[in-house]
Image: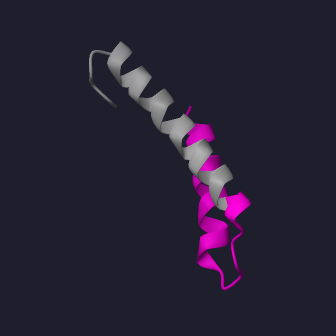
Amino acid sequence: MRNLGEELLRHVNEPMAGPAEVTARELRFCVHRLCEALRDALRIAESRGGRVT
């Protein structure tokens, strides 16, 4: 899970950090993947009784 999160952050941070334009398609992809990652993290936290370590 952590590797997926780190990869996703890299993927999102790189285009946002530079001066290049980000397309709507790229933004939709990033939002979709961020939502998936958050959903997974919340599901894991819930299965652990609400504690995130």
Q: Residue at x 62, y 49 (%)?
A: 8
Seen as rendered, the residue at the extreme left is 50
Q: Residue at x 27, y 15 (%)?
A: 49
> In front here: 1 or 29?
29
> Considering the image in quadrants, where does the C terminus appear?
top left
Q: Position of residue 46 (x, y in %)?
A: 33, 19
Seen as rendered, the residue at the extreme front is 24
> In front here: 32 or 19?
32
- What's the colour scheme? one colour
Seen as rendered, the residue at the extreme bottom is 19
Q: Which residues are magenta?
A: 1-26
- Residue 11 lies in quadrant: bottom right
**Main secondary structure along the magenta-highlighted residues:** helix
> In front here: 10 or 23?
23
Looking at the picture, does residue 18 appear above or below residue 23?
A: below
Q: Position of residue 14 (x, y in %)?
A: 66, 68
Q: Position of residue 25 (x, y in %)?
A: 72, 59
| Number of marks | 0
- Residue 45 lies in quadrant: top left
Looking at the picture, does residue 2 appear above or below residue 24?
A: above
Name the side, left or right, on which 7 lies relative to 37: right
Looking at the picture, does residue 42 appear above or below residue 12?
A: above
- Residue 42 lies in quadrant: top left
Magenta includes 49? no
Q: Residue at x 54, y 45 (%)?
A: 34
> Considering the image in quadrants, where does the N terminus appear?
top right
Looking at the picture, does residue 39 appear above or below residue 14?
A: above
Q: Position of residue 6 (x, y in %)?
A: 58, 48
Q: Residue at x 50, y 28 (%)?
A: 40
Magenta includes 10? yes
